[in-house]
Image: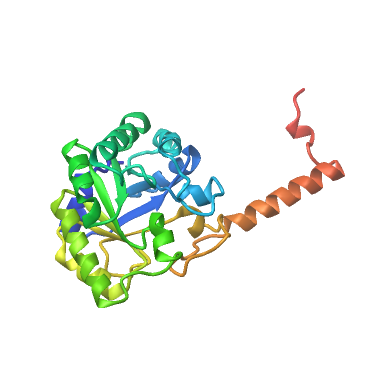
Amino acid sequence: MNKKTAVTILDKKRNNEKVTMLTCYDYVMAKLISSQDIDMLLVGDSLGNIKLGYENTLPVSVDDMIYHTKSVKRGNAGAMLVTDMPFMSYESNVKEAVKNAGRIVKEGATEAVKIEGGIEIIAQVKAIVDAKIPVVGHLGLTPQAINKFGGFKAQGRDKEAQDKLIADAKALEQSGAFAIVLEAIPERLAKEVTEVLNIPTIGIGAGRYCDGQVLVIDDMIGMFTDFTPKFVKKYANIGETIKAAVRSYIDEVKEGKFPKEENTYK
């Protein structure tokens, strides 16, 4: 299985091949997902909701991201590994952004960082790229800005917002980002952005015309059920399978059916 890199992902755009990405937060899931030759694993700050039980991603720390990245790294079998920079790890100034990106790479052994925002954080993106760290941008519904947006709402619906998103995407490309995630925006807008960029777009709720797609693994296999975004397709319902298995275990222990002779040492 060939190791994927930023060059691999850029080549996919040039060759008109779709990019595949899934979130991942631990060793076991990294082994399972990467065994299927996925292109990219994203250690998303969505772990705040999915793994840590927070209401949103805002409480997630750099240390949280490093901890989970190290776990995923040990299970990864060839996918390009990307890690989110969490809220307030890059916004305040360029020096802080480079320092935290460097920590995530050095301590977590990730291969790229993902950063939310457009023109307002271009100086940070350029500085991180200049520090030899590949960057993935993120536009549209940026979860770290939910207080500004008033919740998890689709973005880019009016002309002003659409023009800004296109300008943001171009600025991110010019600053050295090698890919951009587009989240929860109209399909037509995502198509336009994809056509004007030379770097890949990776959609999540952005329609069919992006250069690739990403989903949260716990959403697509039915593990996380607190809420399910419209753009999620469930490819399995592992959550119900787990609950059924636990129920059977409880019943068998209570009824003396487990353990059996084959489960004991002589």
Residue 37 visible, this orientation = no
Q: Quadrant of the N terminus?
A: top left
Q: Nearer the viewer, residue 205 or 18?
A: 205
User: Is residue 51 left or right of 253 when viewed as pictured?
Assistant: left
Locate residue 113, reporting x and y percent: 30, 43
242 left or right of 118 in image: right
Name the residue located 42 percent from the left edge and 50 percent from the top edge: 23
Give the quarter of the figure containing the C terminus: top right
Kindly indicate the quadrant of the structure image that contains residue 261: top right
In this view, the residue in front, 124 or 18, is 124
Q: Is any part of residue 264 visible from this angle? A: yes
- Residue 38 vs residue 266: left or right? left
Q: Position of residue 124 (x, y in %)?
A: 23, 45
Percent coordinates x, y for residue 173 in the rendering:
17, 54
Residue at far right of view: 255
Give the answer, above or below, for where 69 lies relative to 44: above
- Residue name at image x 24 percent, y 43 percent: 5
* Direction from residue 45 to residue 193 in the image, left or right: left
Q: Is residue 101 above or below residue 246?
A: above
Q: Seen from this angle, which residue lies furthest top? A: 266
- Residue closer to the observer: 39 or 72: 72
Q: Position of residue 159 (x, y in %)?
A: 24, 77
Q: Residue at x 58, y 55 (%)?
A: 238
| Residue that appears at 27% across and 53% down | 137
